[in-house]
Image: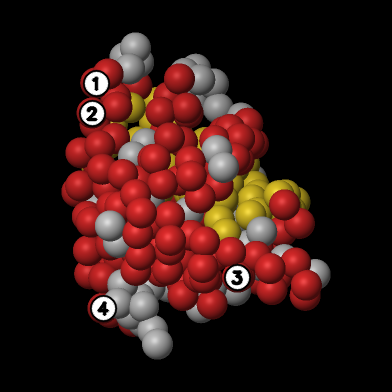
């Protein structure tokens, strides 16, 4: 049976919007529980690969409650966090207000990652954490990331992966099918919201296809950083200086 929050094509955005509206207030807690806190380390690695500093501009897509966007801004980058979900942005805005960060360093806006409201060649780094898989067309999302990156800019994508080892993949998918929805039920009252992870991952080609697409787009040095045997992965590349 398909997940109530998963729909292909044009209905995808509305269903994903409903999902995140239902879990926004508990999103950070549930991320800690389902990943045993490791998501914080993986996001830290995203920020390291982005290599931002004072005087650079960064864009974090599908920014959610703001983990990556806040970290980029804390490193001195003029940062924009963009998300489709108003409820998630409300949580991110609250975190920004409660931080010691200069609010001018981070702007949070609502928008579509597949139709970015920025001109070409705008950002030194463009990141996305757990968002590419949720787009109706992940390839158009990647193309938009590349479009708004400056020549030489860094593209960094953190997402659920698909382990190459068949046994580990089976065990991992069992965890996503059984344990993660149970956590969602116990702490959020909504098992379906977290059963969505596996459903969406079934329709997402994961890290190796993303790397191949980066090669097709002639991005520089496309590489994969795997965690937990490929259960999580970062795709990284740079936009050519002379396209």
Which residue corresponds to the image point at 43% horizontal and 63% vertical from the top-left? 181
State yes or no: discs 4 and 1 in contact (Cβ < 8 Å).
Answer: no
Residue 61 at x, y = what percent? 40, 48
Specify which label sits upstream in the sequence, 4 or 2: 4
Task: Say which mark, if any, is on residue 94.
Answer: 2
Crowd class of label 3 (few under 14; some 14 to 19; many from 20; radius 10 Å): few
Task: Say which mark, if any, is on residue 174.
Answer: 3
Specify which label sits upstream in the sequence, 3 or 4: 4
Instruction: Name the quadrant of the C terminus.
Output: bottom right
State yes or no: discs 1 and 2 in contact (Cβ < 8 Å).
Answer: yes
Which residue corresponds to the image point at 41% horizontal and 46% vertical from the top-left? 30
Name, please, the residue furthest toward the bottom: 1
Specify which label sits upstream in the sequence, 3 or 2: 2
Specify which label sits upstream in the sequence, 1 or 3: 1
Q: How far apart are marks 4 and 2 (CA)?
A: 29 Å
Which of discs 3 and 4 lies nearer the camera? The answer is 3
Which of discs 3 and 2 lies nearer the camera? The answer is 3
Crowd class of label 2 (few under 14; some 14 to 19; many from 20; radius 10 Å): few
State yes or no: discs 3 and 4 in contact (Cβ < 8 Å).
Answer: no
Q: Distance between the residues labelled 3 and 4?
A: 27 Å
Q: How many labels does the image show?
A: 4
Q: Is residue 58 above or below residue 238?
A: above
Crowd class of label 1 (few under 14; some 14 to 19; many from 20; radius 10 Å): few
Which of discs 4 and 2 lies nearer the camera? The answer is 2
Task: Say which mark, if any, is on residue 97.
Answer: 1
Q: Is residue 8 left or right of residue 91?
A: right
Q: Nearer the viewer, residue 32 or 7?
A: 32
Tell me the residue that label 4 is attached to. Answer: 11
């Amino acid at each position: 049976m398909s997940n109530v929050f998963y729909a292909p094509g044009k209905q995808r955005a509305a269903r994903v919007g409903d999902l995140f509206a239902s879990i926004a207030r508990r999103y950070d807690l549930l991320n800690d529980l389902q990943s045993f806190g490791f998501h914080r380390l993986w996001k830290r690695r995203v920020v390291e690969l982005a290599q931002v500093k004072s005087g650079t501009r960064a864009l974090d897509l599908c920014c959610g409650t703001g983990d990556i966007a806040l970290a980029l801004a804390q490193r001195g980058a003029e940062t924009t966090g963009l998300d489709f979900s108003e409820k998630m942005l409300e949580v991110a805005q609250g975190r920004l207000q409660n931080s010691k960060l200069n609010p001018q360093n981070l702007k949070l806006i609502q928008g579509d990652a597949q139709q970015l409201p920025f001109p070409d060649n705008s950002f030194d780094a463009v990141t996305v954490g757990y968002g590419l898989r949720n787009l109706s067309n992940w390839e158009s999302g990647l193309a938009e990331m590349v479009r708004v990156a400056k020549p030489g800019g860094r593209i960094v994508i953190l997402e659920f992966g698909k382990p190459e080892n068949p046994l580990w993949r089976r065990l991992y998918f069992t965890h996503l099918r059984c344990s993660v929805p149970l956590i969602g039920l116990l702490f959020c009252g909504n098992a379906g919201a977290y059963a969505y992870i596996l459903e969406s991952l079934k329709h997402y080609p994961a890290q190796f296809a993303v790397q191949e697409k980066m090669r097709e787009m002639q991005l520089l040095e496309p590489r994969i950083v795997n965690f937990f045997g490929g259960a999580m992965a970062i795709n990284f590349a740079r936009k050519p200086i002379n396209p």
